Amino acid sequence: MVDVPLGPTGAVAPADVEDVELYHPHSWVTKYVFSQDAKIIAIQYSFVALSVGLIALVLSWLMRLQLGFPGVFSFIDANAYYQFITMHGMMMVVYVLTALFLGGFGNYLIPLMVGARDMVFPYINMLSFWIYLLAVLVLVASFFAPGGPTGAGWTLYPPQAILSGTPGGQDWGIVLMLASLMIFIIGFTMGGLNYVVTVLQARARGMTLMRMPLTVWGIFTASFMALLAFPALFVGAVMMLFDRIFGTSFFMPAIVEMGQPLDRNGGSPLLFQHLFWFFGHPEVYIVALPAFGIVSDLISTHARRNIFGYRMMVWALLAIGALSFVVWAHHMYVSGMNPYFGFFFATTTLIIAVPTAIKVYNWILTLWRGNIHLTVPMLFALAFIVTFVNGGLTGLFLGNVVVDVPLSDTMFVVAHFHMVMGVAPILVIFGAIYHWYPKVTGRMLNDTLGKLHFWVTFLGAYAIFFPMHYLGLMGIPRRYHDIADMSFVPPSAHTLNAFITIVALIVGATQLVFVFNLFWSLRHGRPSGGNPWQATTLEWQTPETPPPHGNWGKDLPVVYRWAYDYSVPGADQDFLPQNQPGITRTVPGSSHG
Amino acid sequence: MAVALILVLVAVGSVVFHLVSPWWWTPIASNWRYIDNTIIITFWITGAVFVAVVLFMAYCVYRFRHQAGRQAHYEPENKRLEWWLTVVTGIGVAAMLAPGLFVWRQFITVPEDATDIEIFGQQWQWSFRLPGADGQLATSGAHLIDPDNPLGINREDPKSQDDVVIEGGELHLPIGKPVKALLRSVDVLHNFYVPELRAKMDLVPGQVSYIWFTPTRTGTFDILCAELCGVGHSQMRGKLVVQEQSDYQAWLQDQAARSFARLTPAAN
Amino acid sequence: MGSILLFLSVLAVIGAWWLSRQGLASKPWLEQGTASALVEANATPPSKIGLGIFLAVVGSLFALFISAYAMRMQLPDWRMVPMPRILWLNTAMLVLSSLALHGAKNAAGRGAMPELRLGLLAAGISALAFLSGQLLAWRQLTGEGYLLAANPANAFFYVLTGMHGLHLLGGLVALGRTTEKAWRETTAEPLRLSVELCATYWHFMLLVWLVFLSVLTGWAGEFVDICRQLLT
């Protein structure tokens, strides 16, 4: 027996949360509608985000129908097509993925996982959701505004975004889009402050930073990044609104539009691109880091093994978060910016590959010598690794400045970012929902439906986006309403496009199985008990499931160990909850730790 | 078992698709073979990593699947293994980055003997300006644009006298001569993209960007716009015709004769 | 993008310093079994941390505006805006406001209610004076023909001052609630935290304003140029 030494723990802030004034709802409305309970807010966020996701999914069908069967659906003209791609992109990136990971999972999991009763600023947390909802409504309103939503592409590049040659450019579309983004950012800032400060100040006794589950680390880092990155979009949006409404020339150079000179002068379209990508690149990691964190916990729990190289995982998260602020111009290699920037940004971009690769290695090394339960969450986690590795590797093409030249603005880019920040994070979201649904509802999701949903989604999404890379390699540009009359495109490429469309329709329709499962299991799912996966983290140790307001009953949990004590030698079960007081045990890891 | 098998199929299937599918890049028609080579290097390295990771996963899923009595191995970390993997990854990344940066330097360094041409974008057509006998382009500006002067050429500039303007037509270039394309837009962002050339660059209103290339194969190629430029984006097409020197000269003479009439300074 | 990167570097240094004290190199799997060795809660109230992080967000917003300003400024159509004289008076008002709140904070610490109320009131009134002064500056500039859309320098002047004003207005809401509370309460104790938060926010807004002023008058640009010359 090796006596386990108590390592230095450093300054910790395990603030007891008694001083957080708990809000006590008095009526149905204040309990379920204007609720200040983070768990209810999380469900509200998730519900709205998933609804927006369904809208965006339908938009993707419409654009795929046009690409797969051009001209067959006459209502999808170029105007509508560009509106669909724009709204699909912006909705998915900001209003679905960001909102779901941070607003949904962040709200539900942070307080439970760090052992707090609630977020530290519950009232602001509630406001955050309602402002988010307002942002969504403003965005959706643009569908009904004169001229329809903006069709400027989700990047909203000026001058195009605010000129008449673009749908919504001189109508309401772009104004509502920018307004909605600004509202979203204000709402997000309120939520983000909560997520960050709760992790900093409301952790249970004993919950040192290095005992936190990686899910919390991921959401925490991503929230911090989002707080600092979203202002760039805000600044860009304010300036573009001024250009659009008051006729200023922040981004508008001298322009002759359709033969008519406009009263603008001297502005710089590249300035907007810098601002946009200063937000836009961290945004990729704002979506990815929570996924990284969650998938680490899914793999560890369902492989019954501690996450391999926990410290490396934390350091890699932090390194990725910091580096992601100095890579933004890799989206602008062919934008006409100073070409010498290419050297710097290609180097920083490829450096980021190293910590990212470390994370991948540690995930698969966690599987190694594990005890792998192929549950539905685990399947999604495995599929995440496949799609993320695939998409991450194609990122090495696009980040490497000269390789990007022929590939940028082609379908290769579309395939790449869908694989890496579309499919991969969404697979994690599904896995996470299958994993935590029992905690939220007290019932398991149906396993058979889950497996059906998984296989069609994973293999289907892979079949959609893997071949798409090759269309881009061939030279087919993205954002083309119609790829007819290109001499270098063989007829087989159109067949491939039709195939992709059909698979996309099937995968999309399969999501209805998932939605059905969500509602059906609410009533008919197998009762789960408090800890169906036999997991170690605190959210599974609540006295009641689903946890009531305040989470912990009378006493807050006290944390005695890190989040990954699975299959500890000498323990009488294969997991030791974080709040279980210690047993002395042998530590094989200490010999080479 | 089935899961491991499907993972293997995904990995192997991806490789097979890569090797046998008919969808691959168009035959190159410029000097940027280096770019293709860098892509090939990147494909090899990333492909190997992808296959290795997925096959390793498949093996783990098969070998360490849950069975009665199995207990996972407890090992919080293995520093040596992690550092070793980090170093190997670093080397792999460097192996892709180094040739990339090397070729990028060539990409942005225009050779001395390159001929200036202008590629001019507007919603939604391509125009071109070729220098005449003097080999030089006149200055220009958006404020000079009017129906008689669609590219806004400065007619005070003596070099403007022989500039050849081709509005919405075909761009012809001689084979084997390096070309520096100056890219101008007058309204929104566009992107000059000919898949066979491999090179592409945005046209940004308010500034002049550039790319250079040497056509290496005669033929007619599509010019596409690769930066969303409004509702007519996918209709913004042009043609690039690469010709032998003699054919090119004949074509240029013909174009020059046509465009002189429009470019003489307006009588006042 | 220099100023935002500089700002983020400062944040990164602070973050790295903080993280270095969190035992990021410790091996948590060796520390199982007890919580008692852990340091007890530090007493910083969450709202203070929250405000600190909010100020980081606001700072990032303003640093980005300055970055955009610096990039746009280099283009040839830029014409500096002459600073209306009243800006100096406004600056004095904002300094006064900040000082008054500082006084209020000290008074709250001592439990001196009358001084506290006076400080809050003075701060509120001088902040309102600052905002009205800014509006006057806008009117003056518009009157002299420096219209919003006429030149990017004008546009930046209105946007930067407007953004700063809006943030101060938001602060005034909090200050107003605190002031109102100061008249309801009889002791300073329940007010101490709010007053302290207001004071921090005010000092930050003053700092932002001084930075803006140096940017808008061109001093910051000259300063950067001098630094550049010294380096070369």
Image (spheres, coloured by chain):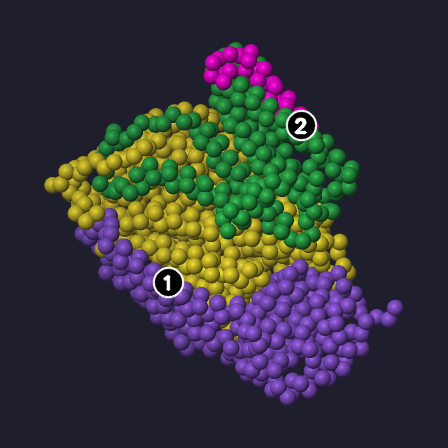
* Quadrant holding the C terminus of chain B: bottom right
Q: Are marks 1 and 2 in contact (CB under 8 Å)?
A: no
Q: Colour of chain C?
A: green
Mark 2 lies on a secondary structure that is: helix
Query: Who's the residue at 52% across and 65% down the image?
Result: A408
Labels 1, 2: front one = 2
Query: Where, quadrant-wise, is the N terminus of chain B in this rendering?
Result: bottom left
Chain letter, colour purple in render: B
Q: Which residues are magenta?
A: C106-132
Q: Is residue C117 magenta?
A: yes
* Residue matched to label 2: C89
Chain for disc number 1: B
- Is residue A578 shown left or right of residue B260? left
**How many marks do you count on the picture?**
2
Quadrant of residue C46 within the rendered picture:
top left
Residue found farthest to the right: B268
Q: Using the image as rendered, state which of residue A341 and residue C219 is in the foreground.
A: C219
In-front residue for pair A294/A357: A357
Mark drawn on residue C132 = none
Q: Rounded to the nearest whole Å, what is the CA distance between mark 1 and mark 2?
A: 58 Å
Q: Residues within 10 Å of mark 2 (few under 14, many from 20)?
A: some
